[in-house]
């Protein structure tokens, strides 16, 4: 089979690393890809949201299966366009991807179908949003309705900050049309976990559990990022919690999407807030998580191409997922200043020192290659991922590898996985 993967981050590198292990695969392309991906796939210079060019490429090359990494092409309708052209593609349709693309839609869906989530209201008028916020004790949470690259959520410890967040989103239009509507919601307390499941619109098959680390600094301090590291499995998702999440959240959501005429096919990702006994949905994503995909796929034993094909053909019930029993930990190495402004073009050193390390893989996210030198080219630069027997060993293994890599201003969290140790 010829496979095309769309995207250029650590998630896409992990997807391609896994796809490349399938005996069914003859050739992998990635658009646009990165230098790490280029070692296992042919990178083509087409942007992830240039649907027309991607479609023309897939037709020209006779691509048998396309896998979409990021949310933007999904919410723009890449799946509909490819399917119209008779191309096989893994991911939800435009209307199904709205479960991520519009927080107002996903909250309304959850409310209508009794899927547990924070109490909320949606507004298209800033003054009304402020009036509603004012009736609640801070902290309150203010979210831009549309896609805002992970920056549209404000946790507001005071009412002044809530008003400011509403102004930034609705009046200053910091996220453009994504801020035409705003969701004001209750602040939830607990521990977060990422719950991903494959679905063909009928059956729902959970992936191994994972936990992301959203804040930039140790002990969950500093601003939110795309994710500074992740590990799998997450002990907080006990077998009974997994059953609860499936019965109360994942299966009802897939059913709800079907009832709404928005059959969801692909990976449904629920960002959860877990308290002692309950799980509530913080948000849905219509795609694989980044960096959760890196540790999850390092543990996946099943041929992922079989799973993609089964989802597309509505045969997910025939698939059983098998997992490596070891723990995988991924530490994101980032540029100084991320998630704010950062410089690019720093020379990355030390990767050669990792060549002989077993069960360690370095997924590239923001890198570039110039005159044979590997340079930083983004906020999140590398996702170093290691397996180990038990979480403590996996943590030791991953940091042994991380410490061999360096560049001017490198920043990473030193406590990835620590929550998994303390909750054991
Ligand atoms: P979201 O993009 O909606 O997942 O929000 C990004 C991050 O903001 C989440 O991962 C949480 O850390 C935090 N967050 C979002 N909604 C809430 C909430 N209702 N209560 C507490 N924290 C939240
Ligand atoms: N790691 C968070 C996300 O993929 O949205």
Image: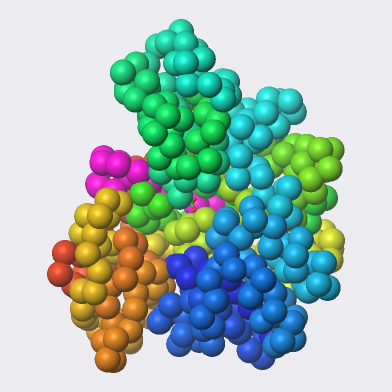
Quadrant position of residue 262: top right
Residue at image coords 39%, 73%: 364
Residue at image coords 57%, 56%: 72
Q: Is residue 80 left or right of residue 384?
A: right
Q: Please state the horizontal and vertical placement of residue 81, each as a whole percent of the image.
A: 75, 65
Q: Please state the horizontal and vertical placement of residue 230, each as a whole percent of the image.
A: 41, 55
Type of colouring: rainbow
Inspect this view and state whether residue 361 appears.
yes
Q: Is residue 114 above or below residue 40?
A: above
Q: Please state the horizontal and vertical placement of residue 212, each as a whole percent of the image.
A: 43, 50
Q: Is residue 119 left or right of residue 201?
A: left
Q: Is residue 42 above or below residue 207?
A: below
Q: Which span of residues is magenta-colored?
A: 206-224
* Nearest the eye: 265 or 351: 265
- For the C terminus, the quadrant is top left
Q: Is residue 117 left or right of residue 205?
A: left
Asked if the stretch drawn in magenta spans residue 149, the answer is: no
Inspect this view and state whether residue 242 appears.
no
Residue at image coords 47%, 80%: 37
- For the N terminus, the quadrant is bottom right
Quadrant position of residue 156: top left
Residue at image coords 67%, 71%: 52
* Nearest the eye: 90 or 388: 90
Q: Is residue 303 above or below residue 153?
A: below
* Nearest the eye: 258 or 133: 133
Taking the view exactly as shown, the residue that stands out farthest to the left is: 408
Q: Please state the horizontal and vertical placement of residue 398, each as a whole percent of the image.
A: 32, 67
């Amino acid at each position: 089979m010829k496979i095309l993967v769309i995207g250029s981050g650590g998630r896409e590198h992990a997807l391609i690393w896994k796809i490349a292990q399938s005996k069914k695969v003859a050739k992998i392309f990635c658009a646009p890809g990165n230098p790490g991906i280029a070692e296992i796939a042919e990178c083509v210079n087409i942007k992830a949201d240039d649907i027309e060019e991607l479609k023309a490429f897939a037709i020209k090359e006779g691509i048998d299966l396309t896998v979409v990494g990021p949310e933007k092409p999904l919410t723009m309708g890449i799946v509909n366009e490819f399917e119209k052209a008779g191309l096989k593609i893994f991911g939800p349709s435009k209307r199904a991807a709205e479960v991520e693309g519009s927080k107002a839609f996903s909250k309304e869906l959850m409310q209508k179908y009794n899927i547990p989530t924070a109490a909320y209201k949606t507004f298209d008028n800033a003054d009304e949003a402020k009036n509603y916020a004012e009736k609640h004790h801070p902290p309150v949470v203010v979210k831009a309705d549309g896609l805002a690259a992970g920056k549209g959520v404000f946790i507001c410890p005071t009412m002044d900050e809530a008003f400011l967040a509403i102004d930034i989103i609705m009046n200053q239009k910091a996220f453009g049309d994504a801020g035409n509507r705003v969701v004001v919601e209750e602040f939830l307390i607990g521990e977060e976990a990422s719950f991903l499941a494959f679905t063909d619109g009928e059956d729902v098959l959970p992936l191994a559990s994972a936990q992301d680390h959203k804040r930039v600094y140790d002990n969950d301090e500093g601003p939110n990022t795309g994710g500074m590291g992740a590990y799998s499995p997450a002990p907080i998702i006990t077998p009974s919690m997994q059953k609860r999440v499936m019965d109360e959240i994942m299966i009802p959501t897939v059913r709800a999407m079907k009832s709404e005429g928005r059959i969801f096919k692909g990976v449904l990702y629920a960002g959860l807030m877990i308290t002692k006994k309950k799980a509530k949905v913080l948000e849905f994503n219509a795609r694989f998580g980044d960096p959760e995909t890196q540790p999850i796929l390092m543990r996946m034993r099943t041929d992922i191409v079989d799973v993609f094909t089964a989802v597309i053909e509505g045969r997910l019930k025939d698939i059983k997922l098998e997992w490596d029993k070891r723990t995988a930990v991924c530490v994101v190495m980032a540029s100084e200043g991320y998630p704010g402004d950062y410089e690019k073009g720093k020379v990355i050193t030390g990767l050669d020192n990792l060549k002989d390390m077993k069960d360690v893989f370095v997924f590239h996210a923001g890198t570039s290659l110039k005159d044979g030198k590997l340079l930083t080219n983004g906020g999140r630069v590398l996702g170093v991922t290691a397996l180990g027997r038990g979480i403590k060993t996996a943590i030791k293994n991953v940091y042994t590898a991380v410490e061999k890599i360096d560049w001017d201003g490198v920043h990473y969290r030193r406590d990835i996985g620590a929550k998994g140790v303390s909750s054991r």
